[in-house]
Amino acid sequence: MLRLENISKTFNKGTVNEKKALSGLNLHLSSGDFVTVIGGNGAGKSTMLNAIAGVWPVDKGRIFLDGNDITALPEHKRAEFISRVFQDPMMGTAPDMQVEENLALALRRGQRRGLRWGVTAGEKAQYRELLKPLGLGLEDRMSTKVGLLSGGQRQALTLLMASLKKPKLLLLDEHTAALDPATSQTVLELTDRIVGDDGLTAMMITHNMSNAIRHGNRLIMMNDGKIIFDIKGEEKKRLTKHDLVNMFAELSGVQMESDRILLTK
């Protein structure tokens, strides 16, 4: 479903602030893969997601999605088939619009919008059924402005909106990092359910090694703009945090007394 070939990206090239963020990055994802991504500060995790989403052009390499070369495609065009949920619960929704209006926007993604746009009674019934499984009571607050919701409610709504049109690829950029532990767990369980039920291909950046091991069918570790470790299936299930710390030290050449480096955002 996704193929990155020799992707490189350098910021502030030719200045004292030059930073090579991605260096010959290669990655292949099969349809239905749910990949968790870990790595230290500056490893290139978010830069990789930005490259896939088309936030800026890459310096070198090609990006293919579902067999199509999207390297030169602008971000707004990629948004038709790539969805993204950010770390900040305030992003991804329109705070001054109602819950049902936000869902209507998500459902009309990629469609032309005219002056007669509105939320029909049939759609309201559909949204109510979509919101019920979240278990957050949002089905009874559909006329509430999204800006009045809690961070967890808003992030759950954002996740639902991002998956409504069944994107070819779902990008999750530390989407639970700003939430308290209990709410984070709720959103992660919802993530598992949505990705699994809809058979989505997804990538999730996380700074929590336990979550990286527990969720998804595949785990990759990044350092200095490259993937240094890639594991999936039963091998991934047998991993421990201690394994990851030792693996990072061995592959990166960085010795550490704790998992602090891997836990850095």
Image (cartoon, rainbow, N blue to C red):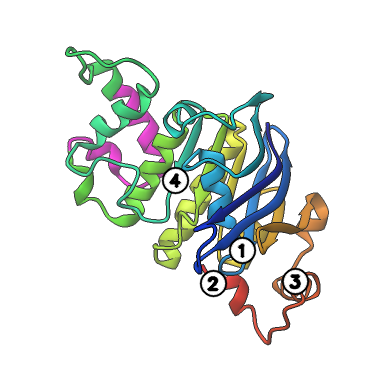
Q: Amino acid at mark 1?
A: Ala
Tell me the crowding category of disc 3: few under 14, some 14 to 19, or many 20 or more residues within 10 angstroms, Cα based. some
Cα distance between the residues tagged 2 and 3? 15 Å
Is residue 215 in view?
Answer: no
Q: Position of residue 43 (x, y in %)?
A: 61, 63
Tell me the crowding category of disc 4: few under 14, some 14 to 19, or many 20 or more residues within 10 angstroms, Cα based. many
Under tag 2, what secondary structure?
A: loop
Instruction: Give the residue pinned by disc 4.
Output: 85
Q: Amino acid at mark 2?
A: Thr
Cα distance between the residues tagged 1 and 3? 11 Å
Of mark 2 and mark 4, the one earlier in the sequence is 4
Under tag 1, what secondary structure?
A: loop
Tell me the crowding category of disc 1: few under 14, some 14 to 19, or many 20 or more residues within 10 angstroms, Cα based. many
Instruction: Give the residue pinned by disc 2.
Output: 264
Q: Is residue 127 magenta?
A: yes
Question: What type of secondary structure mainly makes up the magenta span?
Answer: helix
Q: Position of residue 12 (x, y in %)?
A: 49, 58
Instruction: Give the residue pinned by disc 1.
Output: 43
Instruction: Give the residue pinned by disc 3.
Output: 252
Q: Is residue 155 magenta?
A: no
